[in-house]
Image: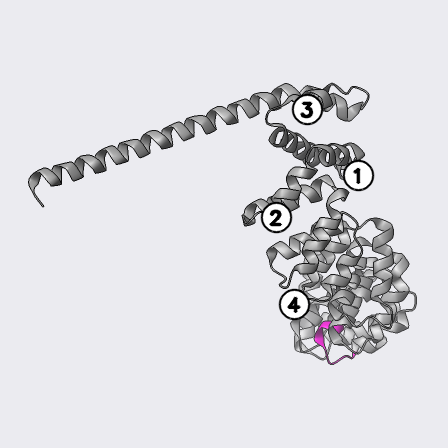
Amino acid sequence: MTIDQIWIFIAFLFFGQLLLLVVLALRKQRLTAKEQTINQQYDALTEAFSSYMMDPEDDRFVHEIRQSPHQIVVLERLLNGFVSITKSSISSPLVAQLSQEFLTENYQKKIKQHNWSTRMNTLYFIEDFRMQSLTPLLMEKLQKATRLDQETQQLIRTLAALNEPSTLAILGNHPDASVRLYIDVLKRLAESTRLAQLAKAFEPAETNKTFRHAAITFIGTEGLSAFLPHIEKELQHPDKEIRIQALKSISQLHYISDPVLLMPFFHSSSWQERMFASQIAGRLQLSRFKEVLSELLGDSVWWVRYASAEALVQFADGDILLAHLSMNHPDRFARDMATQWKSSRLGSEE
């Protein structure tokens, strides 16, 4: 290669890079100008949008959004902001109406695109805006899914938000589905649908352990005391994890119809069952269990000793019991635990 050819090659590279910089600069300028235009339209339509959401008869916004050259992006931002700050937006018919009228066709295309992030963002918007019109398309997509990947999980959550009850049955086809995902679905279903599905979780024909576990957890955290008979029945379940979760839920519900149901758990080979039984006895102040709680103060597992001491201190005479046990319990570790709780109790009263 001659010197002239080298210089020509260098010049070619230089002008090529210069051209690339110019193209990138122009592209950035166009994107900036587009973003500015979108922001201006967003600001210009905010007042009309707010007025329409408070009074649908003031339909200036509907006419103005139809004329917007960036209709999709501007409406998404307005609706997303409304959903974020307004609790009632979840059930707002105006959000669903606007999104279905102006966004349905666009989302039908986006949900089929190859770009993963575009599909995921679209699913989030469909869920937030409660776009019922897209339920058939999403169900078709879900039925074709073979793996419970992140997109399939969000697809299930979105359909649950659209109150599609079959999502739980479809979820049952995926053995790797987590308890957390089942709970996410239950939270999104409409109340009547949710209650019906919770009842199904306890039917004899229901063999899905994960679903049953999730239902018990949900009932406890949401305080659904109407399901207490179902939870108490689960105390007899052969699976230890189900029994433990049932004990947790009873502790959260702060009620048990018959304290005798707890008796077997104080002497269980599972330390978790002994611990939760102790917690329930304390929270419900079941004085008939003072003696067994005093015995569990000397349990071989620290967590059980802690739970029994915490339970004893919740009784009216808990201070006296702990003072007595700190001096007279035959187990050294029990005496130490009683002394610690007695000291902390005294410290909190000073």
Q: Which residues are the magenta region? A: 267-273
Element assignment for label 1:
helix
Q: Which mark is residue 272?
A: none
Q: CA separation, marks 3 and 1? A: 24 Å
Verify whether residue 11 appears in magenta. no
Q: CA separation, marks 2 and 3? A: 25 Å
Element assignment for label 4:
loop
Relative side of 5 to 228, left or right: left
Q: CA separation, marks 1 and 4? A: 32 Å
Residue 316 seen from this side: no
The vertical placement of 13 against 287, above or below, is above
Circles 1 and 4: CB atoms closer than 8 Å: no
Q: Which mark is in front, 3 or 1?
A: 3
Q: Earlier in the sequence, mark 4 or mark 3?
A: 3
Closer-to-camera residue (84/92): 92
Residue under label 2, please give it. Answer: 112
Residue under label 3, please give it. Answer: 66
Q: Position of residue 152 (x, y in %)?
A: 64, 56
Residue under label 4, please give it. Answer: 176
Q: Earlier in the sequence, mark 1 or mark 2?
A: 1
For residue 53, which quarter of the picture?
top right
